[in-house]
Image (spheres, grey):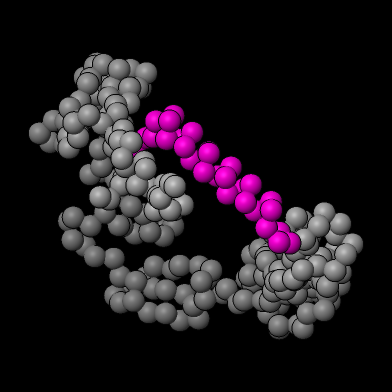
């Protein structure tokens, strides 16, 4: 029989689980050379069979060097100027005057304390250059885009002396009403405040499962939590699948 991990367990089942864990812990304490302590040394994890971490570790796991972006050194520079003192150890990318994304990659050194930042530079001019609207077709020249705007009546994008503008005449106007009230729609798409607080409306819960737990909101609304109570048999089956059948 399959068990549902989303169901709640009774206190008796939790007590049985605690008893099993304690039995396993007691067995571990009498096992040969269990791990008693772990230390971090640079990029290495050292495991000891005693609490004395000055002894030779039972075994060591070497982890890869930690590398991540440094938030202070990483960012978009709209008008880049290379400086050897600012970008220590980096090579001039010859991107002066352009928008550049500077990536500062921080690496922790072998001593586990000091850090080194390596710089990379991405030319962002193709993405950041100004958009210019113009005549009859889409043309990209020197990273500048020229495009014709459709004259169709349902097109909300229009041209002005300052560039492109979205025509909002077809949008729904904001209505001054009470926060939390139910909104009513008219046939033409306009909206109005019904004066009925949404907290006072109790909606039917679709797809609810019988005997599931129910959650109540402060306004009296309800919802199906999707959580049912596990039977003792289901809890026992779950425990047996992990720890083996109780002897």
Q: Is 95 located above or below residue 198 in the figure?
A: below
From where the camera sits, is residue 84 visible? yes
User: Residue 82: where, in percent of width, then height?
Assistant: 77, 75
* Residue 227 visible somewhere in the drawing: no
What predominant SS class does the magenta segment belong to?
Answer: helix
> Quadrant location of residue 223?
top left
Residue 95 pos. (x, y %): 68, 79
Q: Residue furthest left?
A: 187
Q: Is residue 230 left or right of residue 37?
A: left
Residue 2: in magenta span: no
Which corner quadrant of the image does residue 117 belong to? bottom right
- Quadrant hosting residue 174: top left
Q: Residue furthest front?
A: 247
Q: Is residue 30 magenta?
A: yes
Badge count: 0
State the extent of the magenta-drawn residues as a range. Answer: 7-34
The residue under the point 31% across, 40% down is 233
Q: Nearer the viewer, residue 3 or 211?
A: 3
Q: Nearer the viewer, residue 34 or 47?
A: 34
Instruction: Check the image and report above or below for 211 versus 3.
Output: above
Residue 221 on image: x %, y %: 28, 22
Residue 9 location, x and y as percent? 39, 34
């Amino acid at each position: 029989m399959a068990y549902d991990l989303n169901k709640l367990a009774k206190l008796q089942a939790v007590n049985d689980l605690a008893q099993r864990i304690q039995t396993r812990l007691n067995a571990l304490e009498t096992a040969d050379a269990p791990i008693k302590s772990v230390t971090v040394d640079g990029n290495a994890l050292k495991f000891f069979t005693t609490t004395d971490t000055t002894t030779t570790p039972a075994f060591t796991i070497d982890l890869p060097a930690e590398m991540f972006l440094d938030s202070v050194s990483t960012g978009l520079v709209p008008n880049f100027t290379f400086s050897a003192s600012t970008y220590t150890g980096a090579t001039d990318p010859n991107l002066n005057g352009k928008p550049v994304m500077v990536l500062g990659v921080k690496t922790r050194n072998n001593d586990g304390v000091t850090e080194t930042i390596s710089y990379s530079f991405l030319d962002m001019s193709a993405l950041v250059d100004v958009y210019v609207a113009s005549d009859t077709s889409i043309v990209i020249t020197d990273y500048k885009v020229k495009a014709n705007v459709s004259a169709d009546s349902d097109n909300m994008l229009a041209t002005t002396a300052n560039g492109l503008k979205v025509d909002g005449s077809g949008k729904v106007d904001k209505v001054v009403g009470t926060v939390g009230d139910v909104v009513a729609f008219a046939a033409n798409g306009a909206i109005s405040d019904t004066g009925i607080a949404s907290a006072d409306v109790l909606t039917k819960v679709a797809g609810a499962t019988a005997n599931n737990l129910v959650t109540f909101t402060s306004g009296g609304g309800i919802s199906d939590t999707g959580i049912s109570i596990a039977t003792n048999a289901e809890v026992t089956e779950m425990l047996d699948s992990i720890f083996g059948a109780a002897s």
